[in-house]
Amino acid sequence: MVAVTVYLAATVVGLTFAYFKYIHRRRRPNEPEIVPGNLIWGNGADFAEHAVNFLHRCQKKFGDIFTIRLLNQYLTMVMDPHSYENLAREKAFDFDPIQRQVNHNVFNFELVDARKMLSEAGKKVNGRFLTTGMKNFSDNLKNAFQKVTNIDVNGNIYKTEGDNWGQDGLRDLTSKTLFSALFYTIFGQGEANEEFEPQVFYKNFDNFHKYFNYLWLGLPVKMFPKALTALNVLSKQPSSEEMLKRPGVSEYIKFSTEFMKANNQTEQDIVGHNLVFLHVNYNTFRLSFWLLYHILEDKKTFVALQQEVNDLIESQSAPGDDNGSPLGITIEEFDKLPILDSIIKETLRVTSGVFMVRYISKDTEFEMDNGQKVSVREGDRVAMYPPAIHKDPEIFEDPEVFKHDRFVDAKFYKNGKELKNPLVAFGSLCPGKKYSLLQTKWFLVNLVNSFDIALLEGQSTQCDVNYYGHEILPPTHDVQVQYRLKEKFRELEFIARRQC
Ligand code: HEM
């Protein structure tokens, strides 16, 4: 009995010590107000329930800057969108520990010389690599489109055309087309029967992502058996030597694999890094699902986009050249379609769930755009929450409504002043922004050009707000669509430049 009492007393003393050392804090002069929360998880439950509503409530009460706590992590939230540029520029606000946290806690590896690697690897999806990457992507997309338009009925293969409609979940269809093309563009092609293939990764990534927020905060993967099972499948990859030899493997993977090998990183580290890279690309897949969903859900959006694509094809076709050969289209031509551009921005506005977060590397006096100076503390994190900006009714009228032309020639204001960056779904650092947008644009233009596609009667879905914290939110559930090849269409071909 005495032993039990001593044990309990020691536990209570230990927990009290840990609480005061790691969690409890007294606000220092000029620091932002601290939002009251639960003794153990702080504001975690409110944030998990509906992050945007919670932050808007806090903003009303505490103003444009305040501090919340998620488990043991203090985050100072900057809610003023005009202060975005100041936050992105501040030298004491560091992204590296955040990127390390994701790598270590979620994907179980550490990157040696991370800053050099990320800035060099980032170049492999920009500049001249954009065109070669897009060419591979467009070839892989063409193959994927061909596969889904050949349906197997009792061993007989039919084209989904005329009265032969194909039917699938929209998300499943997007995975078989866009995600499949992304996967092969990143990792190149392998044996036809191998397990390292897009559908296996799509299904297991979906299972794994359910636990992303818990893992990110540092809870061990062993606590979540389903996440562990998925991670084990996702970790079955070709060796680095085999990966480098795969036909069509991306410049990004070639560079990152060679860089990591030169730094004596293990095979397991390389596997972890491949997964992080696929994880960031997964956002392009999620975004594409939502793009399709919105154009199918709203007839006006579909008609406007179809018209724009028809106009593009007409403007690029020379009279009498419709001899069945594909029509070449360059990046410049499909990148500057105003309706398509606006649909993508509007989709990003309503579906992004990301944090733009930085580690505070030393005590800092942060100056907001209005000149207010606030002290923030070394070891804390400072963050902006783009979805809270994207759903602000003062900036975006009727923020819950999807308006396909909202961003056409538009300016947005807060407190009477024009916003330099009203849409911050990519944060300030994402090197894949341009590439990802081009891929979604090419996907959508081609799909609208060559497919008849419609939601089945009564099908609808919405963003799953339990995933707030992820870059692009997934839907609560999939919706069924029917699709077939159009009777008549001019095939499009991605070309680097137009011959004079
Ligand atoms: C819809 C698609 C995407 C969205 C919404 C997105 C969003 C983001 C966001 C919000 C960040 C954090 C930036 C910050 O805090 O300033 C980020 C970082 C990053 N993204 Fe993306 N991303 C997307 C696609 C991609 C793609 C396709 C790639 C690669 C080709 C990529 C590569 C990266 C990398 C490497 C980082 C870390 C940058 C660093 O450590 O400096 N992303 N992304």
Image (spheres, rainbow, N blue to C red):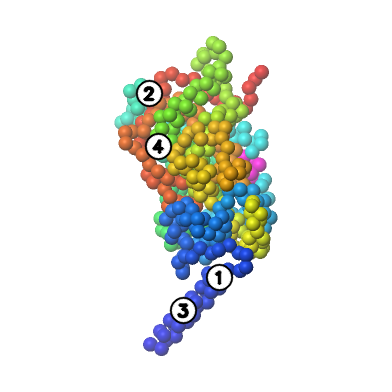
Residue drawn at the location 58% of the way across and 41% of the way down: 433
Image location (x, y in percent) of residue 146: 45, 28
Q: Secondary structure at mark 2?
A: loop
- Compared with 334, 186 (above or below) is below
Q: Which residue is mark 3?
A: 11
Q: Disc 1 designates what residue?
A: 25
State the SS at label 3. helix
Task: From the top left corner, tell me how far across and down residue 16 is, in percent.
Answer: 49, 77
Question: Given the image, on which type of amino acid does mark 1 rest?
Answer: Arg
User: Is residue 470 on the magenta stretch?
Assistant: no
Measure the C-alpha gap from mark 4 to mark 3: 52 Å
Look at the image and tell me in which quarter the N terminus lies.
bottom left
Tell me which residue sits at (49%, 31%) in the image. 444
Q: Earlier in the sequence, mark 4 or mark 2?
A: 2
Q: Earlier in the sequence, mark 4 or mark 3?
A: 3
Tag 3: amino acid: Thr
Q: Residues within 10 Å of mark 1 (few under 14, many from 20)?
A: few
Identify the residue at image location x=67%, y=60%: 365
Residue beneath disc 4: 170
Residue 341 shows in the view:
no
Distance between the alpha carbons at the discs numbered 3 and 2: 69 Å
Q: Position of residue 154 (x, y in %)?
A: 31, 31
Q: Amino acid at mark 4?
A: Leu
Q: Tell me the magenta residue range.
A: 121-125
User: Which is closer to the viewer, label 3 or label 2?
Assistant: 3
Task: Tell me the CA gap for discs 2 and 1.
Answer: 65 Å
* Contact? badges 4 and 2 (CB < 8 Å): no
Work out whether residue 296 or residue 367 is closer to the camera in this orientation and state it. 367
Q: Is mark 2 within 8 Å of ligand 1?
A: no
